[in-house]
Image: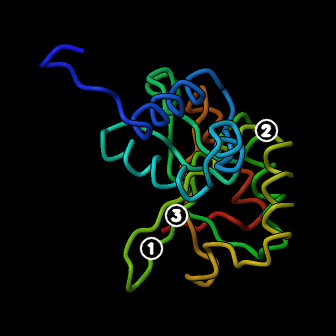
Amino acid sequence: MTAGSKRMTDGEMRRMNILEILNDRTTPVSGTELAGELGVSRQVIVQDIALLRADNKEIMSTYKGYILHSPEMDGRECMRVMRVNHNTEDTLDELQTIVDYGGRVLDVSVEHGLYGHITVDLIINNRLDASEFVAQMEQSHDQPLKALTGGCHYHTVAAQEERNLNLIEEALDKKGYLMRD
């Protein structure tokens, strides 16, 4: 080792491995899975993800796990934020309506009086993703984010064309889910 060289720490190597794993996957990877692959606790993974984000790595957290944001995700789709309100029992129908018309649910957000704007990445691309999300929501026994605001919440929806977004809004409006200003 030369005088100017620096040996990489175990943490730096692990974070580099996390990025490689996420880069090789097109679907989210759970913190538990990363912890198992790298031989550390899930809490160490959570801390590593925070450090990677602080280093400007665009890692999104979804209900299924972590996914690396790629430039291909930007610019090819039209996006619209939709304000909705419905019962928790209607969540699956709402999400499936969006994907059935060619949309992808990127996130859910609420405007909270005390905490301000709260957003959580969802990345729901199809009916299976919607069903898995609702099943996980039911198993968790936690309240969905919309519970903080009496049901009112927002979704960022992406689609290949504006036409799809218009159809999604029309369908959500017909079902009474869409809130107009």
- Counting residues from the start of the chain, the first of labels 1 and 2 encountered is 1
176 or 93, which lies in front?
Answer: 93
- Counting residues from the start of the chain, the first of labels 3 and 2 encountered is 3
Identity, as a three-letter code, of the amino acid under mark 1: Glu
Residue occupying image coordinates x 61% and y 42%: 166
The residue at which mark 2 appears reads as 126
Residue occupying image coordinates x 46% and y 54%: 47
The residue at which mark 1 appears reads as 111
Identity, as a three-letter code, of the amino acid under mark 2: Asn
Estimate the x, y position of residue 146 in percent, counting from the top left. Answer: 62, 74
Q: Check contact, mark 3 vs mark 1: CB within 8 A.
A: yes
Quadrant assignment, res 153: bottom right
Estimate the x, y position of residue 81 in percent, counting from the top left. Answer: 50, 52
Identity, as a three-letter code, of the amino acid under mark 3: Ser
Q: Which residue is at the far top? A: 2
Q: Check contact, mark 1 vs mark 2: CB within 8 A.
A: no
96 or 142, which lies in front?
Answer: 142
